[in-house]
Each structure stands twice: as structure tokens, then as C-alpha cells.
Amino acid sequence: MNTNKGYVAFVGAGPGDIGLITNKGIECLKKADVVLYDRLANPRLLRFTSKDCTFIYCGKLPNNHIMRQEKINETLVEEALKGKYVVRLKGGDPSVFGRVGEEAEAITKYDISFEIVPGVTSSIAASAYAGIPVTHRDYSTSFTIRTGHACKKNEAAIHHEPKQEAIGDTIAYYMGVKGLPGICENLLAQGKSSDTKVAVIEWATLGKQRVVEGTLKTIVEMVKEAELGNPALTIIGDVVQLRSSIAWFEKKAFYQRKLLIAKSSSEESLLERYFSKNGAEAYAFPTLKAIAHSYTTEELQLIVNAERLIFASAEGVEFVFSQLFKADYDLRDLPRQIEHLSDKTRKGLEKRGIRSIKASYDKRSAIFIGNERTIEKQIFSDNLLALPSHTIQIDERFHEVNKRLLTEDCWETVIFPNKQSVDLFLQEWRKFSERNPMELSFAAIGQSVKEYAAKQGFKHIDEQVQQELDNQDWKREC
Ligand code: SAH
């Protein structure tokens, strides 16, 4: 093995729900210098990468190939030959209609090492999320995966289906929306009953998932009426009828609700996680990154010698601690009284083994640590010194992702966790969408944030979301 060469990991991103990528896949993303990702790989997964990782979108839209396959192969080789750790992130499983064979072959010519990390393929995931077991002792003993896409090479396979006995009990057609009439006709011609159940699942496993259920006779019309489009999977077979009793995802309280979560920090959005878990299509926006401030020796001394420390951000806690540690200080050097502004920060301190108290208006001198913006908004008196731990910046690498996600989906509501998030949201939204943001409903954490958002022009409260925020269950679950 030539060690100067880089490495390529072909990683299955899973079908959409970001919880469905493998641990190994996440490990690869964490190591990546470059990620080449497809349209069907959930771009939220890019957040697992390091700050310096480069993203290359190879999105293929139906009929509109953004990056040609040869160009993708070339880029993989080029980046690996520069010595980079390259992740090729593919929707579902890389080996299932994922062209991993072609891409892997291209790089073997250059003797570049690689691995293939499997993923949950969308037919299995879509079936699970639609409440369809692909096999069942009473209904189906086999499961076949097919492409419904009539490209030249496989046209023969589609139009000359094997005899019914060989068809299999449950069949999943990938890329089959456009070809659905042909698929149904063929199966009927081969003797499948016109009552055979069919489910078409669009954007499976995501909050925006839609399922249309019919039979070989009715499904084409139904799909047309519901205007289902790509990406969608067609599942055909008796197992589809089990949906009526075991569909579970569609019962989630926020199923199909499209919620934006406005952000003001680069930490993971707990609200995004909570609402996604409860069935919503939730997207935290904008994507921010934290740039740490390097403290001078004098500043670190001020911190350890302070009477009180007030932390305004969990991220800030991490930045301060790692710098203190590098400078040979540890927990025992810190002042006894440590305070937090928010619950999230309290948890951040707890992780470091510190039990903090809620920040008080104590007259004793203190050092206030947080991100630069938060600090700007504080009123400082003589006995309060501010030492910003980091600056929050827009992560420009997510530009393409944001543009696509904000315009592709029809968002209903925006959730504001604090006032800063209202300002940032408005500032960034305008860069990506021409839609008037005030058309969105809103919900907020706390009365003052709600009033602030209303003052900026937001008009309609989303009662369902607001109630959920008010009852605080989400905090306990996160
Ligand atoms: N390698 C992928 C398949 C790529 S082919 C996998 O293993 O899943 C692209 C097709 O996959 C789409 O046309 C659609 O049929 C299917 N697909 C991928 N993700 C999907 C999703 N979230 N919901 C429904 N269909 C999906």
C-alpha cells in the first residue's frame, strides 16, 4: 500500500432519518477531509464532519444530472491522490442501485485503498416506516428488489419479467414513480391479481414521508392524484395489508409537520432532535460554527483567580476547559462559585463534573464567559469582567444544502429558542428564499421571545408546537 495516497470510504447514509446511518459511517464522516454526497443522502449528516472538511455536492436530480458519473469518479481519484481521506456518502446502501461498483473500480486502477460501509437500504427502511414487514410467515416468504427505471441496459429485464412463480411474494421497485404504469401492466399481464396490494412511499423515514396505498388496479391513479414524486419506493405484495394494523410512524404527534428551528449557537439543536423523533420534518437553520478565542496567560490567570465565574454557553465551557487544561490547570484551580445562565450550560458544566448554580445578581466580582454576541448584550458593571470564549459564525459550507432544503420543502413554522435566533433567522432566510418569512407560523420558548418575534413581524402562532414547547416535555426527553 502506498501510504502517501489517501483513502476512500464509500458510506451508506441510510434512507433519510439520520439515526439510520451506522456507527461506522459516522466514524468515517468524523475523519473525512472531503465528502462527496448525493441528493438522497441526508445533508444533516454533514454536521458530523470536522470544521475543515470540504463538501462536494454530486446531486442528481431526475433528468438533471448535476455531476456526471465520470466526473465523480475523477474527483474521488483526484482527492485521494492528494492524500485526503475521502468519504463518498450515498443514500441508503452504496451497493443497492448506488453505482458503488463503478466508483470502486475507478479507484482500484490507482491502487487507492478503500472500504464499503453498508447502509440501511431505502426499501427495507420505507417498508418498516410504513408498517409493512417485507416477509411474513402467512403472506410472503421472499423479497425481491428491482429497479423500475427503464434505462437502456435494463429495459429488457423490465419488459420481459420472469414467470409469476419466480416473481417473488414481496417486490420493491426503486426509481419507479415514472414507470409505475408499466410495472403494474407487466405484473397484471403475468397473472398477478389486480387486487394485489401496492404501497408507494415517498421520502421514506423522514417527517415529510407520504404513503399512498392501493392495488395493482388503482395505484397509478392514486399516485397521480396525490402527486407523489421522487424519491419514492413501490412495495407490492400481500404484506402491504399489514399496514392497517402496524403502521406506527404515521401516528407520531408531529408527523408531516414541517418545522424550522432557528439557531443561535453551533451546538446540536435539541429541538430539531425532539421534533424529528416525534415525526416532524425538522431542520435547524442557519448552520453555525464556533471559533474559539485563544486566551492569553494573563486571561487564564484571571479566570482561575476570579471570585465567581458565570458561563453563558455550554460550548464556552468546553473551550475554556480545554485551554485551561493545556495550560496545566485543572478543576481544582477553578473558583468555588460557578454559575450558569441556561439549563443547557448547566448540563455542559455537569459533564465536566461541576455542579453550578443559576446566575445571580450578586454584587461580588465575577467573570462572564460566553460567545461574543451574548456578551455584547449583557450590561456590565465595574465588578463584572467579560472574557468571550468564542465567536459564532455562519458555516458557509452549508450554503448549497440550505438553499436546497429551504426551497425544496414548504416549511410551515419556525421555532425560536431565544431572541438572538430571531435576528439570525431573518438575516439568513433572505439569502436563501424569496418567500416572505412572515408567512411562516411561529412558536417560541418563553413569553419575551414570543413578544420579540411578534415585534419583528411574525403573526401566526403555531398552537400545536407552542403547546408542546410550553409543557416542557421536550426538555426532559432531550
Ligand atoms: N442506494 C439507494 C438507492 C439509490 S437509487 C438505497 O439503497 O436506498 C434511488 C432510488 O432509491 C429512488 O428513486 C427511490 O426509489 C429510492 N429511495 C432512496 N431514498 C428513498 C427514500 N427516503 N424514500 C423513498 N425512496 C427512496
Image: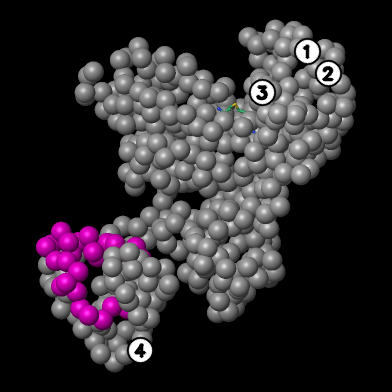
Mark 1–mark 2 CB contact (< 8 Å) = yes
Q: Earlier in the sequence, mark 1 or mark 3?
A: 3
Q: Quadrant of the N terminus?
A: top left
- In the picture of the structure, the residue carrying the numbered disc 4 is 361
* Disc 1 to disc 2, C-alpha distance: 7 Å
Q: Earlier in the sequence, mark 1 or mark 2?
A: 1
Q: Secondary structure at mark 1?
A: helix
Which residue, as the protein is rendered here, is positioned at the far bottom?
363
Ligand 1 within 8 angstroms of badge 3 C-beta: no
Q: Secondary structure at mark 2?
A: loop
- In the picture of the structure, the residue carrying the numbered disc 2 is 192
Q: Secondary structure at mark 4?
A: loop
Mark 2–mark 4 CB contact (< 8 Å) = no
* Rendered residue at 37%/17% (across/down): 107
* Rendered residue at 38%/28% (across/down): 9
Q: Nearer the viewer, mark 2 or mark 4?
A: 2
* Disc 1 to disc 4, C-alpha distance: 78 Å
* Disc 2 to disc 4, C-alpha distance: 76 Å
* Disc 2 to disc 3, C-alpha distance: 16 Å
The disc at residue 164 is 1
Q: Nearer the viewer, mark 3 or mark 4?
A: 3
Residue 72's spot in the image, x, y percent? 45, 23
Q: Earlier in the sequence, mark 1 or mark 4?
A: 1
